[in-house]
Image (cartoon, rainbow, N blue to C red):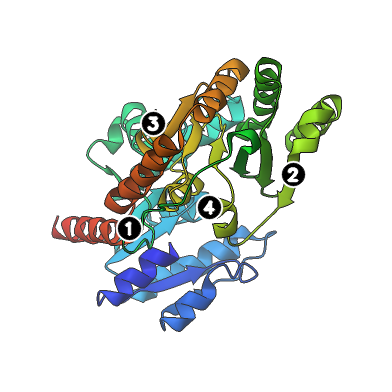
Amino acid sequence: MVNLACSLHDRGHRVEVCIYRSSANFFKKRLIEKNIKILNCDSNSKNKFTLIASLYLFVYRGNYDITMSFLDMPNLILEFISKFIRKSVLVVSERSSYKGFYNHRLFLLKGHFRGFFHSFADHVVTNSITQKIWLNTQYRSLANKVTCIYNGFRIGSIKPKQNRTFDKAHLKLLAVGRTSPEKNIINLIHGLNLFFKENNWLPSISWVGTRDLSSTLSKEYNKQIDELLDSLPLIKNKWEWVGEIDDLRYFYKNHDYLILPSMYEGLPNVVCEALIEGMPVLASDVCDNGNLVKDGERGFLFDPRSPQDISSAISLCTNLSDEEYLDISRDCQKYSHENLNLDNQVIKFENLFYQLLAC
C-alpha cells in the first residue's frame, strides 16, 4: 500500500493515507519522506463507532476522486459508509484468497461475509487470479467489478546470480510465516520425516515469523508442533525458530530454497521476494502459487495435504545439477522483473482509476 501511495504521488497525483492505528507505524517514515499527508484516525477498540465516524468525516470532507481501502476492517467500514455518501469512487482491495484446502467453517463464513458487502463498492481489486475467479463465481453482483493486479516490488535491473549454487549435502530451506494452522507446519514436519527415512539425511530449515498464540486454535496448533518436533529429535536439531525479522535479504541469500507449505494463499509476498532474489521455491499447489512458481521452471509444487508429496518435492530439488539450479535461479529473476515490477502495478492501478472515473 505504501509503495503504491508513494509511486502515485511521484506520478503527480494528490495522495493522502489514513492510519487508524497510530501505534502501527509500519513504513510511516517513507510517507513522511515523500511529504504525503497522513490522516490519523486513532481507534478505541471498545468503541468502533468513533472510528466509523472519523473515517466518515475524512471521506466526506476530503474531496477525493478515489477512496481505496486495504484489508478487512477498512473495507467493511468504507463499504458501510458508501451507503450514506457517494462523493468518490470506492475501490476495495482483497489481499487473501478463499480457495484452497483450508475449509474451516468460520474461515469460509468470513469470506462470504466480506464478499456480500463488496457489492456496495464500485470496484474490487484482488492480488490473485484465484480470488478474482472465486468472487465472480460466488457473487453475480460483482460481475465486471473485479480486477486482479499483482503486487509490485522495487526490482531495478536484472543482475543474474552467476555464483548461486547449493551444497546437496547441506541443503538449507527457508520458511516464512506465522505459525498458524493454515501454514501447514505439521504436514511439513511429517514430509521431512519421510524424506529422512528415504534418504537418510535431512536439510536444515529456518522458520522466520512469530509464534502465533492469538487464539485457542493457534495455541493448540503450536502445542502440537512442539510435541511433534520433540518426538522427532533429528528434525528438531535441524529446525531453527528465527522469530520475526524486518529484512529478509540475508536469509534469501544464505538459503537454497524457500518452502511454503500453506493450505491457501493470496499472492504470497515472500514468494515474490524470493523470486526477485533468484531463490527457487518449493510451494503448495494452491491458489496462484502455480503461476508464480510454474512447476519445474522456478521451483517445484506439491500437494500440501500429502507429506509424501512434500518429501518428493524436496527430493526433486536435491537432484538438480549446479547448472540446472542456476538456470532456475535466473528464470526466477526474469519472471519477477517482467511480472512483479512496481511500475507495472502502479500503471495498472492508475489506468483502472481513470477507467472508473470515466464511467
Question: Split into 4 quadrants, where in the image is the C terminus?
Answer: bottom left
Residue at the far left: name it: 358
Please tell me how many numbered marks the rendered image carries. 4
Foreground mark, 1 or 4, reads 1
- The residue lying toward the viewer, choosing from 252 and 75, is 252
In the displayed structure, 162 sits above or below 3; it is above
Local secondary structure at mark 3: helix
According to the image, label 1 marks what residue?
158
Local secondary structure at mark 1: loop
Question: Split into 4 quadrants, where in the image is the N terminus?
Answer: bottom left
Foreground mark, 2 or 1, reads 1
The amino acid type, in three-letter code, at marker 1 is Ile
User: In the rendering, which numbered label is found on residue 73?
Assistant: 4
Question: Whole-percent x and y of residue 223?
Answer: 82, 33
Q: Earlier in the sequence, mark 2 or mark 3?
A: 2
- The residue lying toward the viewer, choosing from 298 and 65, is 298
Foreground mark, 4 or 2, reads 2
Q: Earlier in the sequence, mark 4 or mark 2?
A: 4
Let me know if residue 202 appears in the view. yes
- The residue lying toward the viewer, choosing from 245 and 12, is 245
Q: Earlier in the sequence, mark 2 or mark 1?
A: 1
Is residue 23 found left or right of 342 in the rendered image?
Answer: right
The amino acid type, in three-letter code, at marker 2 is Glu
In the displayed structure, 17 sits above or below 202; it is below
**Rendering quarter of residue 24:** bottom right
Q: Earlier in the sequence, mark 3 or mark 1?
A: 1
Q: Residue at x 55, y 71 (%)?
A: 41
**Rendering quarter of residue 103:** top right
Q: Residues within 10 Å of mark 2 (few under 14, many from 20)?
A: some
Question: Whole-percent x and y of residue 7?
Answer: 33, 70
Q: Earlier in the sequence, mark 4 or mark 3?
A: 4
According to the image, label 3 marks what residue?
290
